Every structure is written in C-alpha cells, then in structure tokens.
C-alpha cells in the first residue's frame, strides 16, 4: 500500500477481487523480487497444499496495527507511522527495496489503467 501511495494512489480501495487480482498477478509475475524465497508463491486459487496463496491474502494481512488497515473505507494515509511512504517501505517492508516495491505498485496501477479501472492518483 505504501508503494501505491508513493505512486499517487490514495484510495480507498474499491475494487472487487475479480477486478484487481488479474492485473496484480500480471504485475507480480513480471516483478523479479517475487522469485526470492522470502515471498510465498501467489497464484490464482492458491493451493490446497498451502504452498501457494491467492493475491487477496496480501490484503487480508492488513491487520488493525497496519497504517493501511482501513484501505477499503478511507483514503490511504500518506504518512504511514509518521513517515514518508518511501521511508516506510525502507523501514517496514521486507524482501525488496523501496524502489522495487514502488516498481510493483507502478506496474499494478498500469495494469489497472489498461483495463479501464480508472485509477485515480494525485
């Protein structure tokens, strides 16, 4: 979410799963960091073995302690935990650099725009 904020997206998140998951998977599959062992495999439908999960799990992990927990009902904060979004990505998000997270967010937003999902940014 901080990557999306860094790219100008403010939300709130209004997309149903069928609207955003395909674009997310396309962006994810092209994003090199997803091949690192710290990232669980994401695939449509997940798996019964538990070795992979669905993209929507990313949203389900936004617990009440997350600065983005109200992503469906409120605009995304542009100061997560009092930090700039890129600083938040550097300090609080593992597995990729802040630039890499922003790259994923840009790719996702481009996919959504390509589908005419009207991604509003600042």
Image (cartoon, rainbow, N blue to C red):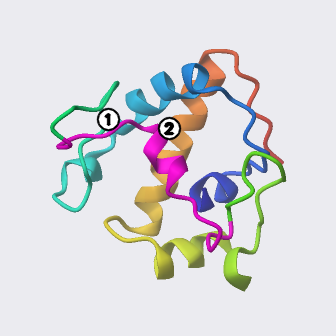
Q: Mark 2 highlights which residue?
A: 107
Q: Secondary structure at mark 2?
A: helix
Nearest the viewer among 42 and 60 is 60
User: Which element type, helix, strand or loop, lies under badge 1?
Assistant: helix
**Separation of residues labelled 2 and 1 (CA atoms):** 9 Å
Comes first in the chain, label 2 or label 1: 1
Q: Residue at x 75, y 74 (%)?
A: 79
Q: Is residue 55 above or below residue 20?
A: below
Is residue 119 in the magenta section? no
The numbered disc on residue 30 is: 1
- Residue 73, given in percent of the width and then of the height, sits at 82, 48
Quarter occupied by residue 96: bottom left
In this orientation, does residue 22 appear?
A: yes
One can see residue 83 in this view: no
Q: Residue at x 31, y 40 (%)?
A: 53
Assess whether mark 1 and mark 2 are in contact (beta carbons under 8 angstroms).
yes
Magenta span of residues: 50-67
The number of numbered badges drawn on the structure is: 2
- Residue situated in front as seen by the camera: 119 or 44: 44
3 versus 51 height, above or below: below
């Amino acid at each position: 979410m901080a990557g999306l904020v860094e790219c100008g997206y403010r939300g709130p998140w209004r997309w149903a799963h069928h609207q955003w998951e395909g674009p997310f998977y396309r962006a994810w599959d092209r994003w090199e960091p997803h091949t690192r062992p710290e990232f669980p495999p994401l695939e449509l439908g997940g798996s019964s073995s538990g070795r992979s999960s669905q993209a929507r799990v990313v949203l389900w992990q936004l617990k009440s302690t997350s600065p983005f927990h109200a992503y469906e009902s409120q605009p995304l904060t542009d100061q997560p935990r009092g930090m700039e979004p890129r600083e938040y990505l550097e300090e609080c998000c593992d597995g990729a650099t802040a630039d890499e997270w922003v790259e994923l967010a840009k790719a996702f937003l481009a996919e959504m725009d390509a589908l005419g999902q009207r991604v509003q940014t600042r």
